[in-house]
Image (tube, rainbow, N blue to C red):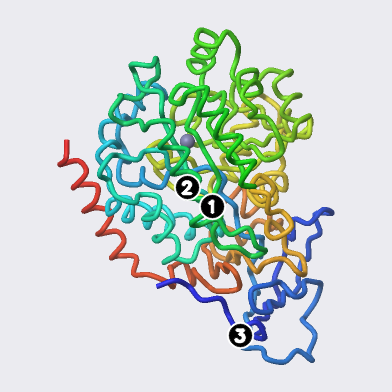
Amino acid sequence: MAVQPPPADRRTVIEHVAIATVDADDTEYARGHLVLLGNRIESVGDGPAPRWLDNVVRRIDGEGHLATPGLVNTHHHFYQWITRGLAQNDILFDWLVALYPAWARIDDSLVHAAALGSAAALLKSGCTTACDHHYVFPRGGGDVLGASIEAVRELGLRFTALRGSMDRGRTDGGLPPDHTVERTEDILISSEAAVDTWHDPSFGSMLQVALAPCSPFSVSTELLRQSAELARRKGVRLHTHGSETTEEVAFCRQRFGMGPTDYFESTGWLGEDVWMAHCVHMDDADIARFAGTGTGVAHCPSSNARLAAGIARVPDMLRAGVPVGLGVDGTASNESGELGTELRNALLINRLHGRPDALTVRQALRLGTMGGARLLGRDHEIGSIEAGKLADLALWRIDGIMHSSIADPVAALVLGALPPLTALFVNGDTVVEHGNLTTADEDRIALACARAAKELASRG
Ligand code: ZN
């Protein structure tokens, strides 16, 4: 059952709470208040809420808590929830080759279970808006994109479905086996249908669609070009994997005679409506071109570490003006599936070059909130706590044993263990309460995911 938005005239008041708004001035309140009206933030400020408010259906004492914007996940593959813990010691290309055969056997019912698991893990770690980059469409597998959309709707996450694709199989010099790829013309027809069926561009939309050919080594040049044209004609955004590994850079040089950034530019893939996952292997000129064109980066620190891909140059990107957000990436390369912990991992990994100020705790929080909102083209709706924006926010408990001795609440969230979530609001509705989903039975999801993983393994 889909979550219903709260009535437009009902207020929720949160008081006595530390607030990191992540607005343009990084405004924070040590002890402030928040008023939610329907699915919007009505007001935020210092001290207690005004006394005159009517229609208050809920009052929350936020003593000992930090309120932040809900986190925004800009890169993920939900179906991978049922292929976790495999190919544990491989680099990307070997890991993909090991997993493609299993992924080629998924269908809509397995994807539905996997998407419930992925979305649940995101919500339970503070994420209120997420993407699912789905690029495996087995023949006879049913409506796998629709299955993921249905699962997310059940749990109440704000969502961007990324209609992914692969059309460059081994015969054409690509990495995926031929039977895992689709025909270019079929992809373009299905992509347009996905936009027409599901994309809702309105303010407050719970479901948007973007086009997302998978990577330079699994899609044709023609598909990249035509996807860019189609996306621009339909007014939707573009996403792909880029510059993830040295092997990918070598592939592009050998196959196209240029590096990934030049290749993307030659196919119409740099621009304010494009964001790419990883971007680990970028030189100064690549970063300048991303900054100059407004092309965004989904930084996925845990996945990059898991696959030994390298460390993306996030501080240099931020200095140059590249829009950067955070991504969990698929859970076959980041088994935790949590977005909240990526704040900490982004900060720690970017300091490994020997720069203690490479990323501050507040920059890390900004990456995970406003940074992601900008990549999705939704920074006027979500990503910060400001009057008029959508009521997507997290209430973290920081007075427990794990955090009470850390004076700075943002440091408690980013440097400490991921705090318990007392409440998570999406569109004004509480979807997590005291750490648990309010919309579904978690044990039922766990069982469905275990069964789906076993079923997929047995199809080998
Ligand atoms: Zn990915």
Q: Amino acid at mark 1?
A: Thr
188 is higher (above) or lower (below) than 208: above
Q: Residues within 10 Å of mark 2 (few under 14, many from 20)?
A: many
Q: Is the CB atom of the residue marked by disc 2 within 8 angstroms of ligand 1's nearest atom?
A: no
The numbered mark at residue 422 is none
Q: Which residue is mark 1?
A: 160
- Tag 1 secondary structure: strand
Task: Pick whichever, 436 or 323, lies toward us.
Answer: 323
Q: Seen in the image, is 108 located left or right of residue 4?
A: left
Q: Is residue 126 visible?
A: no
294 is higher (above) or lower (below) than 235: above
Q: Residue at x 42, y 24 (%)?
A: 92
Task: Pick whichever, 345 or 443, lies toward us.
Answer: 443
Q: CB atoms at circles 1 and 2 under 8 Å apart?
A: yes
Q: Amino acid at mark 2?
A: Asp
Q: Residues within 10 Å of mark 1 (few under 14, many from 20)?
A: many
Q: Which residue is mark 3?
A: 58
Image coordinates of residue 326 in percent, x first then y, are 59, 43
Quarter location, residue 292: top right
Image coordinates of residue 323 in percent, x first then y, are 71, 39
Q: Seen in the image, is 301 located left or right of residue 98?
A: right
Mark closest to the chain's N terminus, 2 or 3 = 3
Q: Amino acid at mark 3?
A: Arg
Q: Is residue 360 visible?
A: yes
Image coordinates of residue 87 in percent, x first then y, are 31, 29
Image coordinates of residue 203 in percent, x first then y, are 67, 63
Q: Residue at x 59, y 44 (%)?
A: 344
Q: Residue at x 50, y 37 (%)?
A: 302
Q: Which residue is mark 2?
A: 132
Mark closest to the chain's N terminus, 1 or 2 = 2
